[in-house]
């Protein structure tokens, strides 16, 4: 038995592997700090309670092919993705660290451009770069470059994805699948033929965090649908709660260029990565207010796409069920599309 590409795709196969290798072997009392959350929750980050505040810590390694693409590059990806993981925990990013590993022979001007992309975005976000590491691997030992980002955030009340309840409304804040679509087009050699594709890569600090902070008691879960896409996030929420999540596919925001391209490739957009989107589960009583505030802060395409319900049948317990464009219903599976080096 060997590691395959789908083990790193963010879907069921990856979580099963991590559970077998790590989670199942760690004693419950060593999964978290007192008053905090760790791998017991398996959220976008870990939470350490310090006095009256919570420190949020997140770490992620970024590897993308190509390293420059429409809408960004690996440096911008590392910063945006790391900050967004902090934001999805309801925390304000206060510091960033990195580890950059490059292959022997990597062009210094390209590395300078990537680092400039990282530092420029950190300046724009007002987040200090407080440390890091740099390594060089022998030629052929690594494919060009990887960047690991460490994000540190602070909040008085973290958002942990364990509080989802029946009646919660699912909100998607922006058109999905844009990042995955542009990377797929490049890897298939179609980037010049498929016009209009561009990564949605961006930090969500200014548009999403103020809304989470304002409605933190009613935001029961928040996640950015990167590897595995929207289907992976919703499937994880449904399975962990043993509830059913109903969505209307026609309400999921998506640009026509992205939809047309992915349909031509035979790929379900729900399984494709986004890098500038948040998925929220919020109390029904505040759903309209949350939606209006998201749009007021700039998320003009934010949409309520579904709800969390008690399962009406054992078959749909722990499942995501979609109302299709033709009026039928189908179970949404979190499927790996085997798209390597995407984020």
Image: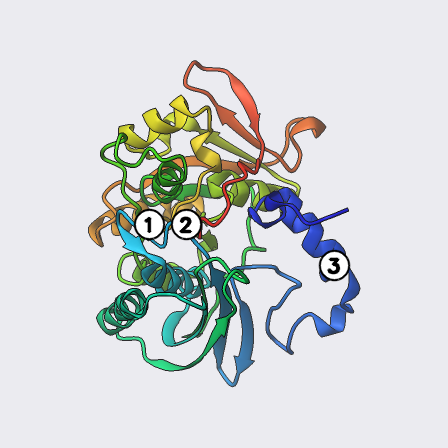
Look at the numbered disc 2 and give the secondary structure of its residue: loop
Q: Which residue is the extreme one toward the bottom?
A: 51
Mark 2 vs 1, N-terminal side: 2
Are the residues tagged 1 and 3 within 8 Å (C-beta)? no
- Closer mark to the observer between disc 1 and disc 3: 3
Mark 1 vs 3, N-terminal side: 3
Q: Is residue 277 left or right of residue 340?
A: left
Q: Nearer the viewer, residue 33 or 13?
A: 13
Q: Is residue 232 visible?
A: yes
Instruction: Specify few, some or many for label 1: CA neighbours under 10 Å numbering under 14, 14-19, or 20 or more.
Output: many
Q: CA distance from mark 1 to mark 3?
A: 39 Å
In this rendering, the answer to whether 149 lies above or below 235 is below
Q: Is residue 282 visible?
A: no
Q: Which residue is mark 2?
A: 65
Q: Which residue is mark 3?
A: 21
Q: How many marks?
A: 3
In this rendering, the answer to whether 329 lies above or below 179 is above
Q: Nearer the viewer, residue 253 or 123?
A: 123
State the residue at coordinates (50%, 15%): 328
In this rendering, the answer to whether 310 lies above or below 78 is above
Mark 2 vs 3, N-terminal side: 3
**Which labelled disc corresponds to residue 318?**
none
Q: Which residue is mark 1?
A: 290
State the residue at coordinates (68%, 56%): 18
Whole-percent x, y for residue 201 in the image = 32, 52
Whole-percent x, y for residue 218 in the image = 44, 55
Whole-percent x, y for residue 203 in the image = 31, 59
In this rendering, the answer to whether 81 lies above or below 234 is below
Q: CA distance from mark 2 to mark 3?
A: 27 Å
Whole-percent x, y for residue 89 in the image = 46, 63
State the residue at coordinates (52%, 68%): 138
Instruction: Specify few, some or many for label 3: CA neighbours under 10 Å numbering under 14, 14-19, or 20 or more.
Output: few
């Amino acid at each position: 038995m060997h590691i395959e590409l789908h083990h790193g795709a963010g879907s069921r196969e990856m979580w099963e592997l991590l559970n077998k290798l790590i989670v199942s072997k760690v004693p419950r009392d060593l999964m978290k700090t007192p008053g905090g959350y760790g791998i017991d929750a398996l959220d976008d980050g870990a939470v350490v309670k310090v006095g009256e505040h919570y420190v949020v810590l997140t770490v992620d390694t970024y590897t993308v092919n190509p390293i420059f693409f429409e809408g960004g590059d690996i440096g911008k990806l590392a910063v945006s993705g790391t900050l967004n993981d902090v934001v999805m925990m309801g925390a304000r990013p206060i510091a960033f660290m990195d580890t950059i590993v490059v292959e022997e022979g990597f062009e210094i001007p390209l590395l300078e451009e990537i680092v400039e992309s990282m530092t420029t975005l950190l300046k724009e976000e007002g987040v200090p770069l407080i440390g890091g590491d740099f390594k060089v691997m022998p030629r052929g030992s690594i494919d060009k470059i990887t960047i690991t980002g460490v994000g540190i955030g602070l909040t008085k009340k973290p958002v942990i994805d364990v509080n989802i309840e029946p009646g919660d409304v699912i909100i998607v804040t922006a058109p999905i699948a844009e990042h995955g679509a542009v990377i797929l087009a490049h890897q298939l050699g179609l980037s010049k033929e498929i016009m209009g594709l561009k990564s949605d890569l961006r930090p969500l600090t200014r548009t999403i965090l103020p809304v989470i902070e304002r409605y933190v008691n009613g935001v029961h879960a928040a996640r950015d649908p990167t590897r595995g896409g929207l289907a992976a996030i919703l499937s994880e929420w449904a399975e962990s709660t043993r509830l059913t999540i109903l969505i209307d596919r026609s309400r999921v925001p998506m640009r026509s260029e992205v939809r047309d391209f992915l349909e031509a490739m035979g790929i379900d957009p729900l399984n494709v990565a986004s890098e500038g989107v948040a998925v929220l589960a919020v109390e029904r009583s505040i759903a309209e207010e949350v939606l209006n505030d998201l749009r007021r802060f700039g998320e003009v395409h934010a949409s309520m796409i579904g709800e969390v319900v008690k399962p009406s049948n054992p078959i749909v317990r722990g499942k995501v069920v979609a109302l299709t464009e033709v009026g039928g219903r189908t179970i949404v599976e979190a499927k790996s599309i085997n798209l390597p080096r995407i984020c």
